[in-house]
Amino acid sequence: IKMYYGNPSATSSSNGDAVFEFFDDFEDLQLKVNDRQLVLGLGSAGEWDDTRILCPQVIKINSTTYHMYYAGHGGDGKFKIGLATSTDRINWKRYSGNPILSPLGSDEDGSWGILEPRVVYFNEQYYMYYTANDDAGMYKIKLATSLDGINWTRQGVVLEGTAGDWDDPNVRASFAGLHNNRVYLYYTGYDSSNYPKVGLATSTDGKNFIKSSNNPLLTTSSKGWDYHASEFMTLIKN
C-alpha cells in the first residue's frame, strides 16, 4: 500500500511541506515510515504552489497513467487545485496547465481559495468534491465534473452544515468512494466547539446527497491522542 501525505505546517520541502510517498505491507498492523521519499516538492519560486502543497489524492486513470490531485498555495495567499501525472506512482510530473481549478473569489469559491480535492469516476465522468469557504469563513463542499480528469466544470455546492447539528456551520471534504453504484462522501464537520468529527453522505447521482442518520460516524475521545479532533480519514477496500 502506498500512502501520499504532506505536512502543511512545515517550513521547507526537506521536512514535509510537500508530498511524500512510502510503502507499507501492513503485515504487523504497524505503519512504517522508514521507506519514505519525496515525490512532489514545492513549485519553483513565483509559481502558484511555491509555498505549500498538501491534500494529495491519487487515482488510476487507465492502464498506464495515474493522476495526483493536490492543493497548492503561493504568493497570492490563495489555495488552488493542481494535477501531477505518473506511470509508476513514484515519479510525478506536474501538468503544464496547472492549476486546473482556481478560486473565483469573493463568496463564489472562498476568499482564501479551494482545497481538499476528492475525485471518483462515476457515470462515465470524473467527479471532484472539494472544500471552499465563503467570505464569512464558512466551509462548504462543492463539486466539479470532467470528462478527461483535466478540464473541469463547476457544479456548485453539494454539501453544507445542518443548522443546529454537529456539523453546523462547517463541512470539509475528507474522502469520496464508490459502493453499490453510489457515491460515499465522507466529510469532516465542525460545530461551535470546533472539535472536528467525521460524517457520511451518500448519493445515487453524484450531486444530491443524503446525510447518514448515524452521523457523526467518528467522534473525538474523552482523552488520548484523538481527544481534540477526528477528521480527514480515508478508506481502503479489503
Image (tube, grey):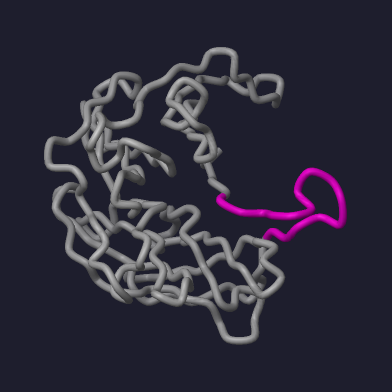
Q: Is residue 179 magenta?
A: no
Residue visible at 65% across and 25% down? 31
Secondary structure of the magenta portion, mostly?
loop
Q: Is residue 105 left or right of residue 26?
A: left
Residue visible at 35% across and 58% down? 114
- Say if 28 sits above or below 6 in the image: above
* Magenta segment boundaries in residue numbering: 218-232
Identify the residue at the far right of this view.
223
Residue visible at 56% across and 77% down? 169
Identify the residue at the far top of this view.
35
Image quadrant where residue 157 sits: bottom left
- Say if 5 sits above or below 177 in the image: above
In this view of the protein, which residue sits in the foreground, 78 or 39?
A: 78
Residue 201, horizontal then vertical, whole percent: 50, 69
In this view of the protein, which residue sits in the foreground, 38 or 212?
A: 38
The quadrant of the image that shows the C terminus is: top right
- Say if 115 sits above or below 25 in the image: below
Residue visible at 45% across and 17% down? 37
Q: Is residue 226 magenta?
A: yes
- Say if 69 sits above or below 66 in the image: below
Residue 17, horizontal then vertical, whole percent: 46, 32
Image quadrant where residue 28 sits: top right
Residue 150, horizontal then vertical, whole percent: 16, 47
Residue 126, horizontal then vertical, whole percent: 24, 54
